[in-house]
Image (tube, rainbow, N blue to C red):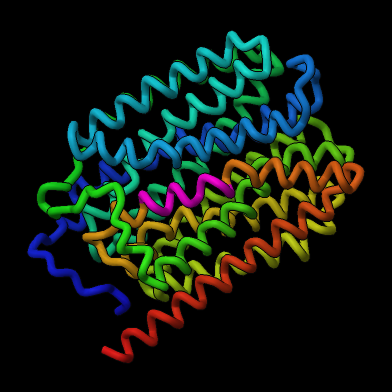
Amino acid sequence: NEAVPEKLKDVPPNGGYGWVCVAACATINGHTWGLNSAYAVFLAYYLANNVFPGATPLHYAFIGGLSISQALIVSPLATLTTRIFGTRTTLLIGVVLETSSFIGASFATHIWHLFLSQGVCFGWGMGFLFVGSVGIAAQWFTTHRSLANGISAAGSGLGGLVYSLAAQAMIKNIGLPWAFRILAILAFVVNTSCALLIKDRNQQIGSSQLSFDYRLFKRMEFLGLLVFGFLSMLGYVVLLFSLPNYARTIGLTAQQGSTVGAILNLGQALGRPPIGYFSDNVGRLNMASSMTFLVGLFCLVIWMFANSFGVLVFFALLSGSVAGTYWATCAPVTTEVIGLVDLPSALSITWLVLVLPTTFSEAIGLEIVALNGGSYTGAILFTGFMYIGAAVFLWLVRAWKIGELEEM
């Protein structure tokens, strides 16, 4: 049993209303990270059609990166509002911001409008919803904690699957502005309902809602975890946002491109619960490091040679099932390495460190493509090696942790 001994009296219920909270968290993930995954379809559309005069591929790449990094930047603020006003208020702030972002984007006429709406404002909304809900599942469980986290994280894959296909269909049939407005209505109704259903157990746990505890930086294993996250995100964002556009570069249609993006998200939805479930048995660090290594391997041996729709779908499903390993295992792995009491602070620091790679990785990916005259070979190598590097750092953390336990 790899669980870290906790100095806590509280015994989580391991079920009951906990499963309602897990379902609500999964649904919120579908309508935050899932909607964000569908940006790959918008990106391919923007790159193929001159929607905003004077905008370059780099501009569009930054919007996708911004939406993720802004979600992480507001995390200390969201942790603060959770401490002062409670979980529900934090979630509802997120609902208002996310809905506003889609409505704003539907009226955008210049690229900077899109930066502020689909990039910054959407990211802030996603951040409040994410921080408000990310720790909830773990509070209700001890025995099935990784499974609960895996199911919750699978929501983003299902959301990405549905909204990749829906966004493509809506853009084609009713146009870009109305596609945004319909997404706004859906996000508002669904996220508000979930915010009202979720209950936290912060008081029972005595959770330290400190936004920042600088002492964590003195712990080598924590620094190793940060590098694992940093490199994972450099690979993950390129993989998540590139496939629909890559499909076009090898001669496939926009519809086929959005299908490939949707299949990647289907892979994420199918892959995350088993990753969570087996983490509880195999060991969370073992599972996270080996799955992360697999993504890198799939990029180098399958994506590199994927020149047809069939092979690309196969790659999307296979890599998707393990691509989001970081998100499925982040909270349980950090809990194991750092402990439950310091978890909110450790996660707050982690989210801020991930701002850099998430902001720039898709831009780096598209720049590498541009430097190679439109070929994705360099970007694929970059993605694969980032994942493999991330796995190596997590193996080092595991070795450090084993050494520590032996000294005890």
Q: What is the chief secondary structure element of the magenta stretch?
A: helix
Establish if 189 lies above or below 214: above
Q: Quadrant of residue 399?
A: bottom left
- Residue 132 in the image: x percent, y percent? 30, 39
- Residue 295 x/y as whole percent: 64, 62
- Rendered position, 189 above or below 274: above
Judge left or right: residue 8 versus residue 39: left
Residue segment shown in magenta: 348-357
Query: How many numbered marks appear?
Result: 0
Left or right placement of residue 272 versus residue 309 in this view? left
The quadrant in which the C terminus is found is bottom left
Q: Residue furthest bottom?
A: 407
Q: Residue at x 18, y 49 (%)?
A: 16
In this rendering, the answer to whether 309 lies above or below 396 is above
Residue 253 image position (x, y, % from top left): 82, 32
Examine the structure image and report whether residue 355 is included in the region drawn in magenta: yes
Magenta span includes 319: no
The residue that appears at 29% across and 62% down in the rendered structure is 144
- From where the camera sits, is residue 367 visible? yes
Q: Is residue 132 left or right of residue 57?
A: left
**Which residue is pictured at 65% across the width and 34% down the height?**
62
**295 or 318, which is in the foreground?**
295
Q: Residue at x 10, y 51 (%)?
A: 204
Residues 398 and 244: in front is 398
Q: Residue furthest left?
A: 9
